[in-house]
Amino acid sequence: MRRRVVITGMGCVTPLGHDVNSTWEALLRGDSGMAPVTIFNASTFPASFCAEVKNFQLPQPLAAGGKHQHAGRHTRFTLAAAMEAWQASGLGESGHFDPDRTGMYLGSGEGSLDFDNFTSLLVDAWAGNRLNTVRWGELAFGRMNVHRETEQEGNMVVAHLAAEFGLRGPAFNSLTACAASTQAVGEASLLIRRGDAEAMLSGGAHSMIHPYGVTGFTRLTALSTRNDQMQTASRPFDMTRDGFVLGEGASILILEEYELARRRGAKMLAEVIGYGSSADAFRITDQDPQGEGAAAGMRAALADAGVGIDQIDYISAHGTSTAQNDSVETMGIKAVFGQRAYQVPVSSMKGSIGHLIAAAGATEMITCVLALRDQVIPPTANYRVPDPECDLDYVPNQPRKAKLETVMSNSFGFGGQNDTLIIRRI
């Protein structure tokens, strides 16, 4: 029999709150995390609003001693989320874990700490030394702070976590776009299943609210441009949807082998029972228009979990609020579930929280655990006008009480990456 994997701790920093409970309560209230961009001057951008994490300070003791003083914005979010999860799990208490058998698997994006500074630095250096490229290089790289610039690397988040918690087990970071943290949780679960680790910190982080990130998504026509209706701009599955709202944040889950958690008397929040992954093999930015890649990932997760479609009580959708994603995900769900698709509630939290990119999947996974705990389905905010192509039960605008035992969470990333997780109440 394969080893069982359970969730024993959770932590998050999101546009709706700086911890799990405040984020969950705001989501159920239908709060909006959307507001004008303050990180940089976006007043001339087609989308001048986003979902920022506001008023965040790295908590003590993380801020003490200066060991994370050069950490990027997304790294600081991750440290706070990991501390919340670590403390909630009790795993760090004396004698409860083996550091050589406890690892990390994150879906973490590139850092954004010095994009503005680095860009202006290069422009200034080049303007003054157009005919002397050697001198230009000396100026540019001589003015860089090596510690700050290395924070651009995605795996630096893993390095900070390892140093903070003294973890010497497997250490991985994947950046499969918007599917990254769902993939990370799935792969971390597989490591525990096969005995390569007994516990893992897993999840994801991202902060792309900077000129480069916003420009990129603008060029892809992926962002909503409803500057005059920013709080309701993200409208998953709604006929009037025109793109997602860029967000940021971090979410971490503590995964443990069931017997370890049982022996130490840990509170088990849910069990990870299935993980599936697939590729569209279609285009770099567009999804397979028939939803075949999404359907393949869901089928793989169901097979891995050993459950049938009649056992899935709720689907946490990727639901970005883009025209293509929402219709393709709907087609994929119908391809897998057949007529039962019309009986399974489906909702997307991105109407309230925005799209956290690499952090999205782990954040949605946390809400799935809370849905199982509280027996309530979070709503799809801002759903007003039904779309004939999106004709499922999207739990519009209000949370819904429901009997939940087994739930599915979908994440789809640029490049055609599809990842699905299934968790069960325990």
Image (spheres, rainbow, N blue to C red):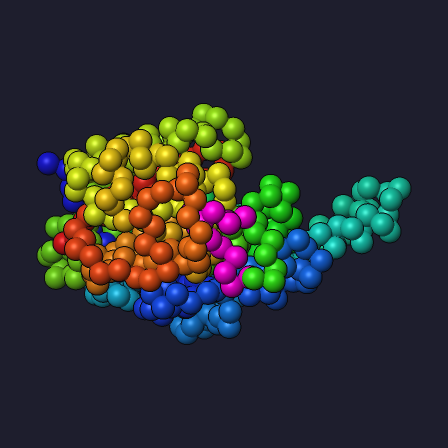
- Examine the image and state in which quarter residue 378 appears: bottom left
Residue visible at 33% across and 65% down in the picture? 28
Q: Where residue 74 appears, x then y in whole percent?
A: 49, 58
In the rendered image, the residue lying farthest to the top is 281
Q: Where residue 293 appears, x then y in whole percent?
A: 38, 30
**Residue 159 in sight here:** no
Nearer the observer, 395 or 408: 395
Residue visible at 42% across and 67% down in the picture? 31
Q: Where residue 357 appears, x then y in whole percent?
A: 47, 49
Residue visible at 71% across and 52% down in the picture? 119
- Examine the image and state in which quarter residue 78 appears: bottom left
Residue visible at 56% across and 62% down in the picture? 229
Residue 235 shown in magenta? yes
Q: Left or right of 286: which side holds 371?
A: left
Q: Main secondary structure of the magenta part?
A: loop
Magenta stretch: give its range.
Answer: 230-242
Nearer the observer, 323 or 157: 323
Q: Left or right of 154: which side holds 127?
A: right
Q: Left or right of 213: which side holds 189?
A: left
Residue 236 shown in magenta? yes
Q: Where residue 135 appears, x then y in whole percent?
A: 82, 46
Looking at the rendered image, the quarter that the N terminus falls into is: top left
